[in-house]
Amino acid sequence: MKAESATVFRSMTALKTWVNKTRAKKVVLTNGCFDPLHVGHVRYLRGAKEHGDYLVVAVNDDKSTRALKGPNRPVSKAGARARVIAGLKMVDAVLVFGAPNVSGVLNRLRPAFHAKGTDYTRETVPELETSRALGIETIIVGDPKDHGSTEIVERLSTSNRKGKESR
């Protein structure tokens, strides 16, 4: 039975020790900024979990999120984003990491699968060569990409500006 929320790890060593103790046959690793979390993320995580026994989610830290998403991001701090992800039923462990991609995590964790969302194809996944070299299967999961965090943040920002202008 799953605990109320998954464990949030801040070190790869601690995560690797945890995974080894679980004796999981099939670990699925997925990653992202999740800033802010939306329905597409939930569907993506659910789809990833369907491929394995344990779902490990690597969440970009604040610095790498800013580098990937722009100077006004993240909206929420990494610790808060990690705790929200950890509270989802399908998630077993969360790692906060600070690189632009998860090649290093793949190399250390050696999951059975690396899952990415439908905004990628297998050929465009940044870590594909790392996965191939390590014998990790890259999978694309989730629903079509017709919603995104960037659009949500932009809508909220526009709405906030309009509200201030009408005062």
Image (cartoon, grey):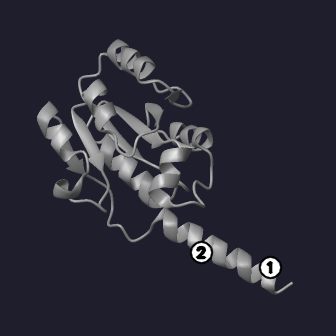
Q: Residue at label 1? A: 164
Rendering coords of residue 166 (x, y %): 82, 87
Of pointers 2 and 1, the one earlier in the residue sequence: 2
> Looking at the picture, which amino acid does disc 2 mark?
Arg
Label 2 sits on a secondary structure element that is helix
Rendering coords of residue 155 (x, y %): 59, 75
Are there few (<14), some (14-19), or many (20+) residues within 10 Å of tag 2?
A: few
In the rendered image, the quadrant that contains the C terminus is bottom right
Give the quarter of the image for residue 118.
Answer: bottom left
Q: Vertical placement of 139 versus 87: above or below?
A: below
Q: Nearer the viewer, residue 60 or 148?
A: 60
Are there few (<14), some (14-19), or many (20+) residues within 10 Å of tag 1?
A: few
Residue lying at 46% horizontally and 41% vertically, measured from the top left? 59
Rendering coords of residue 58 (x, y %): 42, 38
On the rendered structure, is 127 left or right of 82?
A: left
Q: Residue at label 2? A: 155
